[in-house]
Amino acid sequence: EKEVPLAMLALVATAIHASLTEWKSGAHKTIPFSADTYLDVYNEHVITLNGIKDGNVRGYHMMMHNLYKGASGVPAPAQSRTKALAHVDIAGMDID
């Protein structure tokens, strides 16, 4: 089964971290996305993902395979979508 490559997920997680960091003060402040700025964050994500893989190879594979399926547009079975929505309190979501 195909997986999202570890380096790809680490980079995406780093980009999300960078985006959240730009809003840390409550107002947007642009921070250049560069290796100089975020290499340590990227490396921490790689270490974390390798730790998951070392601790549970099958669980790691399933996580990465499910991410691959979700990102590649392979639809989840209808039953899975229905089950997921059962756990979301849509009416109770904040709107303000």
Image: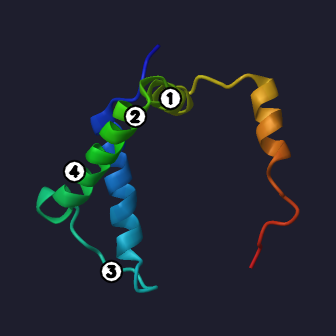
Report the Cα–Cα distance between label 3 and label 4. Answer: 24 Å
Residue at label 3? 29
Sequence-wise, the earlier of marks 3 and 4 is 3
Neighbor class of circle 3 (other Cα within 10 Å; few <14, some 14-19, many 20+) is: few
Residue at x 40%, y 34% (from the top left corner): 55
Q: Are marks 2 and 3 in contact (CB under 8 Å)?
A: no
- Tag 2 and tag 1, C-beta contact below 8 Å: yes
Cα–Cα span, label 3 and label 1 = 38 Å
Vertical comparison of 75 with 18: above or below: above
Q: CA distance from mark 2 to mark 4?
A: 18 Å
2 and 4 marks in contact (CB < 8 Å): no
- Determine whether, in the image, residue 89 is placed left or right of residue 74: right
Task: Reply above or below: 20 against 47.
Answer: below
User: Which sits in the foreground, 92 or 45?
Assistant: 45
Q: Kindly state the secondary structure of the residue where label 2 is placed.
A: helix
Question: Which amino acid type corresponds to the residue marked 2 in the rendered image?
Answer: Gly
Q: Residues within 10 Å of mark 4 (few under 14, many from 20)?
A: some
**x, y percent for residue 45:** 31, 49
Q: Quadrant of residue 89?
A: bottom right
Q: Around disc 1, counting alpha carbons within 10 Å, would you say few (fewer than 14), some (14 to 19), or many (20 or more)?
A: few
Q: Check disc 4 and give the amino acid type.
A: Asn
Side of 76 where 61 appears, left or right: left
Residue positioned 19% across, 59% down in the render:
40
Q: Viewer-nearest of labels 1 and 4?
A: 1
Q: Are marks 3 and 4 in contact (CB under 8 Å)?
A: no
Q: Which residue is mark 1?
A: 59
* Residue type of the residue flagged with mark 3: Lys
Q: Earlier in the sequence, mark 2 or mark 3?
A: 3
Q: What's the CA distance linking mark 2 and mark 1? A: 9 Å
Identify the residue position indicated by label 2 in the image: 55
Q: Secondary structure at mark 1?
A: helix
Mark 3 or 1, nearer chain start? 3
